[in-house]
Image (tube, rainbow, N blue to C red):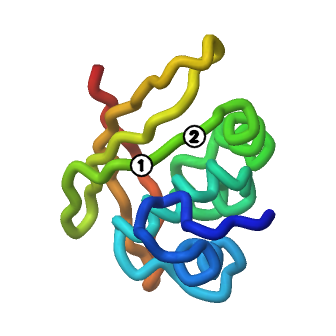
Amino acid sequence: MNITNCPCGSGLSYNNCCQPYHLKAKIAPTAEALMRSRYAAFVVADGDYLFETTHVSKRRGNSKDAYLKSARNTKWLKLNIVAADFDTVEFKPFYLNKKFQTEVLHEKSSFRLENGKWFYFDGLFYS
């Protein structure tokens, strides 16, 4: 996939931002970096990365195929970070619904740092 700007909204090119995480050349150094790279993985439909960066205790019911299907069935538009600290990130990803109208999710996700790697743990959704 040829992407110039990284989908995560960092302002960097994809190959200098989230792609090295997706290719396992680098490990996301912060919870926010992991969350951004997971959003970018949804945009580029990288189900393996989404599965592997989900905490092992939360993988049940979240197969690689399920992540891939979800990613492919959604047209993601942009990501806004609301707030971030050591192990939580509040964010709003925008997407097109089936009627081609823009909608937004609002989530505050928790992450766990284990053995030097960050993992998505869970999220609280706001209406």
Residue nearest the observer in this picture, 67 or 58: 67
In the rendered view, does 5 fall on the left or right side of 115? right
Give percent across and percent down for residue 123.
Answer: 36, 41
Labelled disc at residue 7: none
Question: Gap between marks 2 and 1, in whole Å?
Answer: 8 Å
Q: Secondary structure at mark 2?
A: strand
Question: Could you tell me which residue is drawn at 64 percent across and 50 percent down?
Answer: 43
Dot 1, how many residues are within 10 Å of its Cα: few (below 14), some (14-19), or many (20+)?
A: many
Q: Using the rendered view, name the quadrant where residue 3 is placed.
A: bottom right
Disc number placed over residue 76 in the picture, else none: 2
Q: Residue at x 56, y 83 (%)?
A: 16
Residue lying at the far top of the rendered structure: 99
Q: As displayed, is residue 101 above or below residue 122?
A: above
Q: Is residue 10 left or right of residue 26?
A: left
Q: Quadrant of the C terminus?
A: top left
- Number of residue marks: 2
Q: Residues within 10 Å of mark 2 (few under 14, many from 20)?
A: many
Amino acid, disc 1: Leu
Q: Which residue is mark 1?
A: 79
Q: Where is 124 relative to 49, above or below?
A: above
Q: Are marks 2 and 1 in contact (CB under 8 Å)?
A: yes
